[in-house]
Image (tube, grey):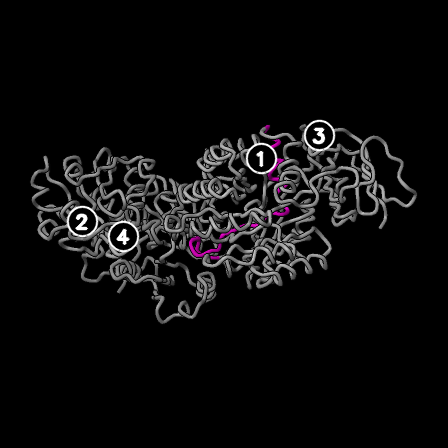
């Protein structure tokens, strides 16, 4: 493997409090040297990182890669390439595939497919319950042994409080988080978007904020009871933020994520029944967006995850209530966050890197999340001011279902390094139009 | 061709008050056609209209069909049963196939909110929403407005209360937008479990008790209580609904004024409305039905690009305005 010199970028690594311009030398798959001017070995590939930020690789703990079962909408390979294009060096694949990832063989399959793809790393998440049916615990131990990094029935809530309690207790042996999709199903039943004035106007059944919040507080209380680590997926409401804050203040082992769409869009984006603005949990109100942005800034929300959910064009081309939930996000996450968190002054780039890289690595016990000497070389180089128009046709994901199509966003991964190997480079960076810089 | 209403009629929310008044004014001359022995004018001769009904409907479909036939359009009725829809064809494929047969307009009734909008964005024909899910039913709203205007002259400052299951009612939404745009004061009254949680944000008064609504209102538009609401658990029983929210003679007798009684039909007599109210002296329920045909004729005529000032001439009454071409009465 050729050595790589990432030359002259702004090195931003919150894991060691680093923010300085300099070089990073990658050799033998690890970070060989960092900081200052480094003289590269003769055969090294030198990448000019001027005006770019060099940071630990981004890690997405929540995406749906659809394989096995729906290879027509995404595969592990296409998803891993889309992730790399978005600046992610690793992603965690949710287990709601067909068949469900609820046993060690299924976990092993994902790992093998990811190795063959050779793009971003893919860490499997195992199901909490067999078949995600919410009845019987799946074999956490064997799945963790095979490489699963967390447990979740995502796509469905864990309805039974008893099952959730047991999962939190049982997962303690293996040291993995239990991820819950917080949704009280009797309250959300039939809902297609946020309950409020827009749903009332459009005549769509709403999903009230309380459907999420009731499960958030239930899970926090169960984490308090059990001492287990509960990780709350895709938080979408102001109330959830307040409840998480309440739990953290009491030392309860709760962590939480927010998706880029929930800090950038509101229910108004549904507009005239646009199914690319339909996801679960739904887009909420500006007040919720504001609360979530603050929560990412102050750490109440620990990390940013995409909930990347590709769907076939035909499935989204339907009556709103019948269309499936979810949008793709791997290739827009960075730019949406730069545009909607950093450029409006809510977050600095250091905190953004912390929320997209260091924090997911730390909380999910994953490799990466640091540029320390000797660490695996998972690195994201991104141009923070690169301005581009989102064109779904140019994406590497097989999905085209994005609400950002046609929008102008700032920030783009220019080079993604996984295990010392370049897995993505963005072309045309020289011709990129420049937006005003921010720190 | 862009009409004064745009390409489609999807709801009353996107219309301006001028557009709504234009439809009502255009409906006026069309009323008379239905009173003739030969109820037909050639205004839409040669136009092809598909009535695409994914939900069963008697009244609305017949009303549209009469309106189309009285304007001399060629019409085809497609219902969900017995069509390719049941074979799993998507809405968009159904629409594209119809359009491939070179039609001019589609009147769509569908169980999904937004279905009319969905169709309108994907085909070039004019689309008229004949009720989409719990979203809007604009022609019902228009015929209600016309009926109120017939009675009050102007809707400015008039107090109209919509009673019942507003949450699931497309009629309620179209009425709220239409009434507000024409300057009426709007209230709703019903059990809170059948009102949208965000109802106050519509800018309407909310009455929890029907007695208060009757005390306040000059007209009541009483919505049909769907029997599914009981099985879905929104309210306990139709018996209790009648006792608490039913519009009865006894309750109306205590009103400080005569109240105009409207109902979009079909009625559940003895549930949301008692028979002696429905058949009483202040009921305009059948006038609504009559106005429905005129309003739908006006909408069809305007969307087809008909000039509102020619509507009088289009009906071929012989009392044409100066400059308007004489359109002969169909034989």
Disc 1 from disc 3: Cα separation: 24 Å
* Mark 4 nearby-residue class (10 Å; few <14, some 14–19, many ≥20): few
Q: What is the distance, in whole Å, between disc 3 and disc 2 at their CAs?
A: 66 Å
Residue plotted at (21% across, 43% down): B148
> In which quadrant is the C terminus of chain B drawn?
bottom left
- Disc number placed over residue B241 in the picture, else none: 2
Q: Residues within 10 Å of mark 2 (few under 14, many from 20)?
A: some
Q: CA distance from mark 1 to mark 2?
A: 49 Å
Name the residue that disc number 4 marks: B233
* SS class, disc 3: loop
Q: Are marks 1 and 3 in contact (CB under 8 Å)?
A: no
Question: Residue A320 in magenta?
Answer: yes
Mark in the foreground, 1 or 2: 2
Q: Chain of mark 4?
A: B
Chain containing the residue with disc 1 = A
Q: Secondary structure at mark 1?
A: helix
The secondary structure type at the circle numbered 2 is helix
The total number of labels drawn is 4
Q: Position of residue A211 (x, y in %)?
A: 41, 45
Q: Which residues are magenta?
A: A318-345
Image disc number at residue B331: none
Looking at the image, is mark 4 or mark 2 earlier in the sequence? Answer: 4
**Whole-Å distance between the Cαs marked 1 and 4?**
42 Å
Residue A204 at what x, y percent from top left?
Answer: 38, 49
- Please indicate, yes or no, whether residue B321 appears anywhere in the rendered image: no
Which residue does the numbered mark 3 point to in the structure image?
A17
């Amino acid at each position: 493997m050729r050595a790589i010199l990432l030359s002259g970028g702004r090195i931003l690594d919150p894991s060691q409090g680093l923010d300085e311009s300099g070089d990073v030398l990658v050799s033998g798959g690890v970070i060989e040297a960092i900081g200052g001017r480094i003289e590269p070995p003769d055969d090294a590939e030198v990448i000019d990182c001027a005006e770019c930020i060099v940071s630990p690789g981004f890690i997405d703990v929540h995406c749906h890669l659809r394989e096995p079962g729906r290879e027509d909408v995404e595969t592990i390979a296409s998803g891993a390439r889309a992730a790399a294009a978005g600046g992610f060096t690793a992603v965690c694949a949710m287990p709601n595939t067909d068949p469900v990832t609820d046993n060690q063989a299924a976990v092993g399959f994902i790992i093998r497919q990811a190795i063959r793809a050779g793009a971003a790393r893919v860490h499997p998440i195992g199901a909490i319950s067999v078949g995600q049916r919410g009845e019987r615990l799946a074999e956490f131990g064997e799945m963790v042994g095979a490489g699963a990094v967390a447990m979740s029935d995502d796509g469905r809530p864990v309805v039974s409080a008893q099952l959730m309690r047991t999962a939190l207790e049982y997962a303690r042996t293996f040291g993995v988080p239990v991820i819950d999709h917080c949704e009280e199903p009797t309250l959300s039943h039939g809902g297609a978007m946020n309950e409020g004035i827009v749903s009332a106007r459009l005549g769509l059944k709403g999903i009230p904020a309380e459907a999420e919040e009731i499960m958030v507080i239930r899970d926090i209380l169960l984490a308090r009871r059990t001492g287990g680590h509960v990780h709350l997926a895709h938080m979408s409401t102001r109330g959830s933020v307040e409840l998480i804050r309440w739990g953290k203040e009491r030392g309860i082992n709760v962590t939480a994520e927010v998706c880029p769409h929930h800090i950038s869009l509101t229910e108004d984006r549904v507009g005239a029944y646009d199914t690319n603005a339909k996801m679960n949990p739904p887009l909420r109100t500006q007040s919720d967006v504001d609360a979530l942005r603050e929560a990412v800034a102050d750490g109440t929300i620990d990390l940013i995850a995409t909930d990347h959910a590709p769907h076939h064009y035909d499935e989204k081309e339907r009556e709103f209530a019948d269309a499936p939930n979810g949008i793709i996000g791997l290739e827009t996450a960075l730019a949406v966050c730069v545009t909607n968190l950093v450029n409006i002054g809510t977050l600095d780039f250091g905190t953004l890197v912390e929320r997209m890289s260091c924090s997911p690595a730390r909380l999910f016990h994953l490799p990466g999340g640091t540029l320390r000497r000797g660490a695996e070389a998972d690195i994201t180089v991104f141009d923070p001011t690169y301005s581009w128009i989102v064109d779904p046709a140019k994406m590497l994901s097989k999905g085209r279902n994005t609400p950002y199509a046609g929008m102008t966003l700032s920030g783009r991964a220019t080079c993604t390094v996984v295990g010392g190997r370049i897995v993505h480079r963005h072309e045309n960076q020289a011709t990129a139009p420049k937006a005003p810089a921010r720190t | 061709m862009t009409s004064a209403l745009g390409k489609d009629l999807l709801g009353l929310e996107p219309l301006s008050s001028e557009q709504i008044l234009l439809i009502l004014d255009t409906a006026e001359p069309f009323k008379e056609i239905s009173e003739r022995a030969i109820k037909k004018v050639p205004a839409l001769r040669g136009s092809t209209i598909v009535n695409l009904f994914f939900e069963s409907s008697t009244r609305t479909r017949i009303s549209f069909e009469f309106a189309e036939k009285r304007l001399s359009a060629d019409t085809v009725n497609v219902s969900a049963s017995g069509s390719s829809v049941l074979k799993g064809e998507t809405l968009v494929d159904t629409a594209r196939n119809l359009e491939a047969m070179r039609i001019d307009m589609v009147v769509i009734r569908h169980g999904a909110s937004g279905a009319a909008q969905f169709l309108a964005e994907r085909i070039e024909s004019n689309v008229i929403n004949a009720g989409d899910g719990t979203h809007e039913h604009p022609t019902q709203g228009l015929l209600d407005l016309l009926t109120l205007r017939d009675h009050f002259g102007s809707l400015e400052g008039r107090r109209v209360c919509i009673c019942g299951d507003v949450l699931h009612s497309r009629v309620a939404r179209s009425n709220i937008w239409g009434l507000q745009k024409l300057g009426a004061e709007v209230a709703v009254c019903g059990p809170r479990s059948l009102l949208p949680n965000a109802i106050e944000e519509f800018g309407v008064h909310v009455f929890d008790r029907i007695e208060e609504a009757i005390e306040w209102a000059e007209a009541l538009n009483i919505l049909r209580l769907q029997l599914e609401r009981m099985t879905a658990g929104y309210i306990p029983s139709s018996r209790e609904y009648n006792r608490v929210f039913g519009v009865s003679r006894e309750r109306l007798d205590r009103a400080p004024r005569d109240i105009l009684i409207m109902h979009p039909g079909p009625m559940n007599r003895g549930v949301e409305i008692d028979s002696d109210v429905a058949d009483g002296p202040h009921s305009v329920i059948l006038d609504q039905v009559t106005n429905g045909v005129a309003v739908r004729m006006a909408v069809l005529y305007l969307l087809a690009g008909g000039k509102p000032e020619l509507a009088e001439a289009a009906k071929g009454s012989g009392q044409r305005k100066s400059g308007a071409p004489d359109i002969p009465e169909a034989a």
